[in-house]
Image: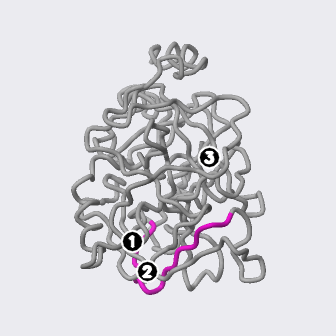
């Protein structure tokens, strides 16, 4: 994987890219994943900026009709009224390619977490849309996890985003979660991670493949990292950063959404109308079409705790990953 913190576009726009002889921060886009169909990930949002025309600069996760979760580093020095979000599409987002399922809205409020820093701790942001999305078969919310949700180690969740080099088609990939100390050890063993502020803190989730080959990359920053639960797909992480894209021994980092339970719920309450419209939906995490998982399947998690709802769902790659990281 590269430093795929997902910042390429957003970071360069903020003027925060630091040239280094060895390392480069770049935005995340899905590498080695599958092409998604309309309805696979209806909570997928794409963030656009006026200065970049119709180019997607970051992703986001729809959690209510008016609120999207994204990455703090995608906000940068942008003003809220310079941004807009689109949803309900898997391919082109230009006017000439819009379909009946396509929706868009400008942004009324954009708030990066006050604890966000140069080490990408607390790399999470909340966006309130100017006009609410309309729930359809292709635009739906992901579930918000409980504050107690801790995804089990080796459990597999799904990252999605508009992939570089694939005509901006929506892609998805199944990604296993790492134990944090093992993640810290392997990243430090690769060198060049002083800028990340390691050790990793509670605001971050580490996930990826030791051999590389599958990862988020440029353009996916802020996008959904969702885990399947008995209730539905829950938004557990937001794409944050990584070193390169899909490189060996370089797992990626995601913002740990359950940690921000109160902050997110307070923001949603502020975005809800006096009549109670646009609050947390009663139904969430449902898809209208089933995604393709030709090799590894996602883990089914317990919605309340994040433990595996079915031990057999942990997957047949557990042993290989477990044996490797325990040698570190």
Residue sitting nearer the eye, 65 or 162: 65
Compute the Cα span from label 1 to label 3: 27 Å
The residue sitting at 58% across, 68% down in the picture is 87
Relative image position of residue 118 (x, y in whole percent): 34, 59
Choose mark 2 or mark 3, whichever is in front. Answer: 2
Question: Which badge, 2 or 1, is on the more N-terminal residue?
Answer: 2
The residue sitting at 49% across, 36% down in the picture is 207
Residue neighbourhood size for the residue with mark 1, other residues' Cα within 10 Å, grouped as few (<14), some (14–19), many (≥20) = many
Q: Is residue 240 visible?
A: no
80 magenta-colored:
yes
Q: Which residues are magenta?
A: 74-89
Q: Quadrant of the N terminus?
A: top right
Which residue is tagged 3?
245
Which residue is tagged 2?
107
Q: Is residue 284 visible?
A: yes
Compute the Cα span from label 2 to label 3: 30 Å
Compute the Cα span from label 2 to label 1: 7 Å
Question: Which badge, 2 or 3, is on the more N-terminal residue?
Answer: 2
Q: Secondary structure at mark 3?
A: loop
Q: Are marks 2 and 1 in contact (CB under 8 Å)?
A: yes
């Amino acid at each position: 994987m590269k430093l795929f913190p997902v910042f390429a576009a957003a970071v360069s726009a903020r003027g925060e890219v630091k040239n280094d002889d060895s390392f480069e921060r770049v935005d995340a886009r899905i590498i080695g994943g599958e092409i998604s169909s309309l309805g696979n990930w209806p909570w997928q949002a794409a963030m656009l900026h006026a200065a970049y025309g119709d180019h997607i600069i970051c992703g986001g996760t729809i959690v209510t009709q008016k609120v999207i979760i994204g990455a703090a580093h995608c906000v940068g020095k942008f003003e809220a009224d310079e941004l807009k979000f689109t949803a309900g599409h898997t391919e082109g987002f230009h006017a000439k390619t819009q379909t009946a399922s396509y929706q868009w809205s400008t942004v009324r409020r954009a708030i990066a977490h006050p604890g966000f820093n140069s080490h990408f701790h607390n790399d999470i942001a909340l966006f309130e849309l100017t006009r609410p999305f309309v729930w359809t078969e292709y635009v739906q919310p992901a579930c918000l996890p409980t504050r107690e949700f801790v995804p089990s180690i080796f459990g597999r969740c799904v990252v999605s985003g508009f992939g570089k080099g694939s005509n901006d088609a929506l892609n998805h990939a199944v990604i296993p979660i790492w134990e944090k100390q093992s993640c810290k050890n392997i990243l430090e063993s690769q060198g060049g991670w002083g800028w990340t502020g390691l050790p990793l803190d509670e605001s971050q989730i580490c996930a990826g493949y030791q051999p590389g080959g599958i990862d988020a990359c440029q353009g996916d920053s802020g996008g959904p990292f969702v885990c399947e639960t008995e209730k539905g797909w829950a938004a557990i992480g937001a794409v944050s950063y990584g070193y390169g894209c899909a490189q060996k021994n370089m797992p990626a980092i995601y913002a740990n959404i359950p940690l921000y339970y109160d902050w997110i719920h307070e923001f949603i309450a502020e975005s809800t109308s006096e009549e109670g419209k646009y609050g947390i939906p009663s139904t969430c995490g449902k898809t209208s079409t089933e995604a393709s998982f030709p090799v590894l399947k996602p883990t089914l998690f317990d919605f309340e705790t994040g433990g595996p709802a079915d031990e057999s769902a942990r997957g047949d790659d557990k042993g290989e990953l477990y044996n490797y990281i325990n040698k570190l």
